Image (cartoon, helix red, strand yellow):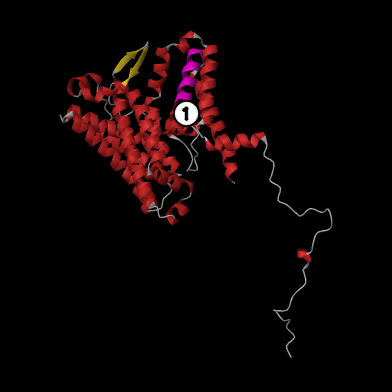
Amino acid sequence: MSTEPDSAAPRGPQEFEKRLPQGEAPAQFVPEATSGLKRVQHLLHAHPTAIPGIVLLVSLVFFSFVVGERFLHPFNFSLIVQQVMIIGIVGVAQTLVILTAGIDLSVGAIMVLSSMVMGRLAVEAGLPAPLAIGVGIGVGALCGGLNGLLVTRFRLPPFIVTLGTWNIFFALNLWYSASETIRAQDIETNAPLLLFFGQAVEVAGARLTYGSVFMLGLVALFWFVLNHTAWGRHVHAVGDDTDSARLAGINTDRILITVYIVAGIICALAAWALIGRIGSASPQAGQTANLDAITAVVIGGTSLFGGRGSIVGTLLGALIVGVFRNGLALSGVNVLWQEFAVGVLIIVAVAIDQWLRRTAR
């Protein structure tokens, strides 16, 4: 005879099903109390441009009191924008790469190589300036494409890849240019179009160059692209979690390659702006552009771990650096301490990024 209990037989209530004693409340999940600091942390995590915006505003107020009218003059503000023009343009390229959880140490070398190609083809080879500029932009795209292929096809870390290509592009730049600078007089005579971004218009006491206007337009364009196009959403998704993006059907390798190509094109456009900014094509120009661009991106709130950041934040970061250097210079502070202040800003920005990332854990 089977000793198994009859499953159809009625059973009495088990221990956990018994009625609670009179007056005893059942167990409940109590939501964790959210402190004011925690709410601020979540708010800043959701709006990455808030911190650089606040820092820029505080910096403007501080130096307006310390320096006075010289700092507040419209011409000085336009000078700050001119000084950060190249950093801002290259910073857009760097932001795209860092959003994918990568980094591009070769952006400065791509820019200078492209500028020498434009200058030598237009001035020495006699090519029409628009054609020379187009070839220079093509060189930038090829350099970016090489970075993208090495990262995706060979699965090499972006830091190592771009460190290597930085040396390659810089060596090619010195070889192609023979370490010779193309003078402003020669450019003005043979290819004045190369100086276009250095031309300026006077607006209410400010001297606004076309390069500055181009930088602002480029930031606006890629703000729209990153926030309102499928490609922009895919860039964020790849940087946030590559494996999840791949499982969601995103061709992650294609996104990465296009990001590096677009970054190379932007660097070539920065090369054109650089010629207009300094009035010549020099193989020694823009030596610190890659580090300056990374500085602007980090201070602007873009996470070095990818997936979180803003092009507008990069512009704010570049302006913060420009305001600090300009304000400290007008205050008579030594260049050494100006760089010290920028270094402190970088460390504080990374520390804040780490603090905000903990909200997602």
| Residue drawn at point x = 74 percent, y = 76 percent | 10
Residue type at the position of mark 1: Gly
On screen, residue 228 above or below 322: below
Magenta span: 319-332
Q: Quadrant of residue 13?
A: bottom right
In the image shown, does 162 or 261 lie closer to the viewer? 261
Q: Tell me if mark 1 has few (under 14), some (14-19) or many (20+) residues whose alpha carbon lies within 10 angstroms of its own.
A: many
Identify the secondary structure beneath mark 1.
helix
- How far from the left and from the top, in percent, is residue 123? 19, 27
Q: Within the magenta stretch, is there residue 320? A: yes
- How far from the left and from the top, in percent, is residue 27? 75, 54
On screen, residue 278 above or below 203: below
Q: How many marks?
A: 1
Q: Is residue 226 left or right of residue 346?
A: left
| Residue drawn at point x = 69 percent, y = 41 percent | 33
- How far from the left and from the top, in percent, is residue 16? 76, 64
Residue most extreme to the top: 69
Quadrant holding the N terminus: bottom right
